[in-house]
Image (cartoon, rainbow, N blue to C red):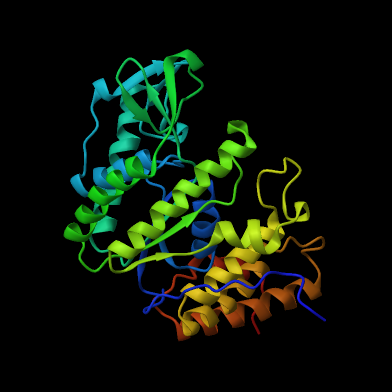
């Protein structure tokens, strides 16, 4: 029987991701699907030090800020909706206290600077080529923070706008960390509020930029998350009810392809073993006081101890404590 899916060729990096390497992720909400999966199977990951960022100018600026270990000060914040906030950060950094907001931002800046210095991989997911600038300061913002729409101008960035921002960022990244390898993806999430046609124009510009960067710089790779959902799966069955976000099945398909093509085979096998332990860890017993559940805990404890012995560089403290809590020792 012919396949129901279009074939896709996924170019693989000459060196693949493996355990004991450090991976920094930045960009749109789809970044967190990749990052959460890697974190779940115990890769060394730092995700979105500015929070989720959608437009490429904000992503490029955030990367430069980590290199510089930019220190934010009181006049970088504004007060709106009873919160102190930053135009360069997601709302997770907002706080009722100005100092509390600054402390969260600057702690994250320091952690990102330190992590990036020795990172092996940087994974960037671009969400949209639309950018919003605050009129008062003529500055692109990472998040509008529910401010009135007339505070902003909206622009569909050109390929040249985005290339210029990332040219500078990548030169500086590779000067700061010459061994860094960079993976770009374009999010398959449809930014439908911009309009269907406008969303496609936006995604096309992002894809063109990434391919130009890939041709210009060594150690830059493109993982086709967008194409896997839009062209390979290409069916509303693979979207949530909003018809915008890929559903669990589609996200799993993308992650499966990422692990297959971008992760070292031995590390992939270790990840599969860890995944089984993590599924058992999240299992909620209906009858925790039964002998059957205690046998289950004992079996998982033995498997976890075996993994911890084989891979001492991975941290299984949480799982060991969990499985030990109700296990029987003979």
Answer left or right for 302 relative to 106: right
Name the residue rendered at 44%, 30% in the picture.
Answer: 143
The quarter of the image holding the N terminus is bottom right
Answer left or right for 17 relative to 201: left
Q: Position of residue 258 (x, y in %)?
A: 53, 69
Answer left or right for 143 relative to 216: right
Of 38 and 301, the residue lying toward us:
38
Q: Position of residue 296 (x, y in %)?
A: 73, 76
Name the residue rendered at 64%, 38% in the picture.
Answer: 196
Which image quarter: residue 45?
bottom left
Which image quarter: residue 225?
bottom right
Residue 281 seen anywhere in this rendered image of the structure: no
Residue 278 seen anywhere in this rendered image of the structure: yes
Q: Is residue 317 above or below residue 73?
A: below
Q: Position of residue 15 (x, y in %)?
A: 37, 78
The quarter of the image holding the C terminus is bottom right
Number of dots carrying numbers: 0
Of 278 and 169, the residue lying toward us:
169
Q: Position of residue 19 (x, y in %)?
A: 41, 75
Which image quarter: residue 161?
top left
Name the residue rendered at 51%, 75% in the picture.
Answer: 261
Q: Is residue 241 above or below residue 229?
A: above
Name the residue rendered at 78%, 65% in the picture.
Answer: 289
């Amino acid at each position: 029987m012919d396949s129901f899916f279009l074939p896709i060729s996924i170019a693989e990096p000459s060196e693949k991701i493996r355990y004991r390497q450090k991976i920094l992720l930045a960009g749109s909400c789809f970044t967190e699907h990749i990052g959460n999966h890697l974190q779940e199977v115990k890769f060394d990951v730092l995700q979105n030090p500015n929070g989720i960022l959608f437009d490429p100018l904000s992503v490029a600026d955030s990367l430069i800020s980590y290199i510089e270990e930019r220190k934010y000060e009181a006049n970088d914040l504004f007060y709106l909706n009873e919160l102190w906030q930053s135009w360069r950060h997601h709302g997770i950094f907002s706080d009722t206290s100005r100092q509390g907001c600054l402390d969260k931002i600057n702690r994250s800046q320091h952690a990102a600077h330190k992590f990036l210095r020795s990172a092996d991989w940087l994974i960037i997911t671009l969400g949209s080529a639309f950018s919003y600038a605050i009129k008062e300061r003529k500055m692109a913002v990472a998040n509008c923070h529910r401010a009135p729409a007339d505070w902003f101008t909206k622009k569909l960035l050109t390929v040249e706008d985005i290339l210029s921002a990332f040219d500078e960022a990548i030169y500086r990244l590779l000067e700061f960390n010459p061994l860094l390898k960079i993976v770009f993806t374009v999010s398959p999430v449809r930014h439908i509020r911009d309009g269907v046609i406008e969303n496609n124009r936006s995604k096309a510009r992002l894809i063109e930029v990434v391919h130009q960067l890939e041709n210009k710089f060594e150690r830059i790779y493109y993982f086709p998350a967008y194409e896997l959902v839009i062209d390979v799966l290409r069916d509303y069955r693979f979207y949530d009810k909003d018809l915008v976000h890929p559903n669990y099945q589609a996200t799993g398909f993308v992650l499966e392809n990422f692990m297959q093509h971008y992760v070292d085979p031995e590390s992939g096998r270790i990840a599969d073993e860890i995944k089984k332990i993590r599924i058992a860890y999240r299992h909620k017993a209906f009858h925790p006081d039964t002998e059957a559940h205690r046998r289950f805990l004992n079996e998982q404890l033995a498997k976890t101890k075996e993994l911890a012995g084989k891979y001492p560089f991975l941290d299984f403290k949480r799982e060991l404590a969990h499985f030990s809590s109700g296990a029987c020792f003979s």
